[in-house]
Amino acid sequence: MVAGRTLLAAGVVATAISLAACSGGDDDAALPAPTGAPDSGAPVGTGTLVTASDPPTVAPTTAAPPTTLAPTTLAPTTLAPTTVPPTAAPSTAPPAPPTTVVPQIDAAAWAVYDMRRGGFLPATTNADAQLPVGSLIKLLAAQAAYAAGNPVKLSVAPPGLIVDPEESRIGIFDGQELSRDLLIRAMLIVSANDAARMLAIDIAGGEPQFAELMNQQAANLGLANTHAVNVTGLDAEGQFSSAIDLSRLAAFLMGNPTFQLTVERRDAQLNGQTIPSTNDLLRTYPGADGVKTGHTTNAGWCIVASAMRDGRRMIVTVIGAPTEAARDAGATALLDWAFTQPLP
């Protein structure tokens, strides 16, 4: 049973993960309420509700003027027409019309959160169910680590950071000195369990103690259907979360520029080797900029996916898909549908 992918052999020496800086989003950083509108009674902030006017009518575009220049490298018999046919398609496709047909995907639970609206869209199934979520629990671990502060603090890796040879890792060796911020990035981008355990030991003295810090953060943020037992997300009795809670947690974390710049990375570089992010949508879905994947035997295939389009961010959580392909297809379908929904 694993939480993520096996990425490197245990002997690989990890000295640094080089991340390029990118620009962050501009949506509200406050934790969203668990309903369609912000909950003023929650113990944390709520997303900003933005009211938009009716979308403008998109005027059709005109075809480009004809050209009389033929490519100089083509033979005369292969020249393309020098004029544009009158039936040429517009250069910019009109926006997709809104649809009330909510996608039904192959998964145990899902939810869609619109950060511009500050609430959930009506595309939820079993969204409050307490379910195993694999490495998605590392989002809560990241929040606990950020709350601990001192990101540049160095710690020395103890032995035994990897329990199962099939676990995801970055290849930390015994005695290696690494900073907290590097460990957080490794945990989020490549779902490294050795980095997660080292972080827990550095901050709290051990994994059970760090799990308690994670649960304190869950309580502070009003995540009533979330409870941590370990930092890695490996299957354990009493460890669970929900599609609603994870969507709200991800929306909150995306307000942290450090977190946002981390989870939008498509890969990490380690000792001259490039390790891809476990989030395939970063490479396949236009506008995708996060967040985290998870997979264990009990959890199935899970993802919290974020994407931006025209300044509007959607966050989709899918839990318990039967395959990796079904997980990605489900998240893609929900994002596509969400971006067709008009603002109120």
Image: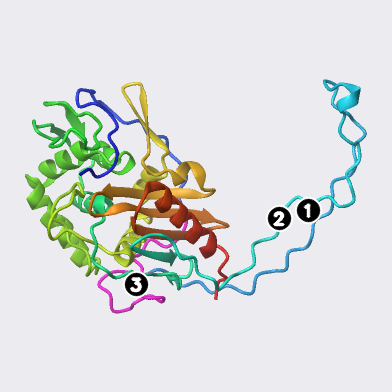
Give percent across and percent down for residue 140.
24, 55
Amino acid found under the numbered disc labelled 3: Ala
Which numbered disc flags the more N-terminal residue, 3 or 1?
3
Locate the C terminus by quadrant: bottom right
Q: Residue at x 65, y 70 (%)?
A: 55
Mark 3 vs mark 2, CA separation in Å: 34 Å
Region of the chain picked out in magenta, as a range: 26-46
Give percent across and percent down for residue 260.
39, 49
**Cβ–Cβ under 8 Å for marks 1 and 2:** yes
Q: Residue at x 64, y 62 (%)?
A: 96
Q: From this view, report whether residue 315 is shown above or below residue 67.
A: below
Residue behind mark 3: 33
Crowding around mark 1 (Cα neighbors within 10 Å: few <14, some 14 to 19, many 20+) is few
Q: Main secondary structure of the magenta part?
A: loop
Q: Residue at x 7, y 45 (%)?
A: 206
SS at circle 1: loop
Amino acid found under the numbered disc labelled 1: Pro
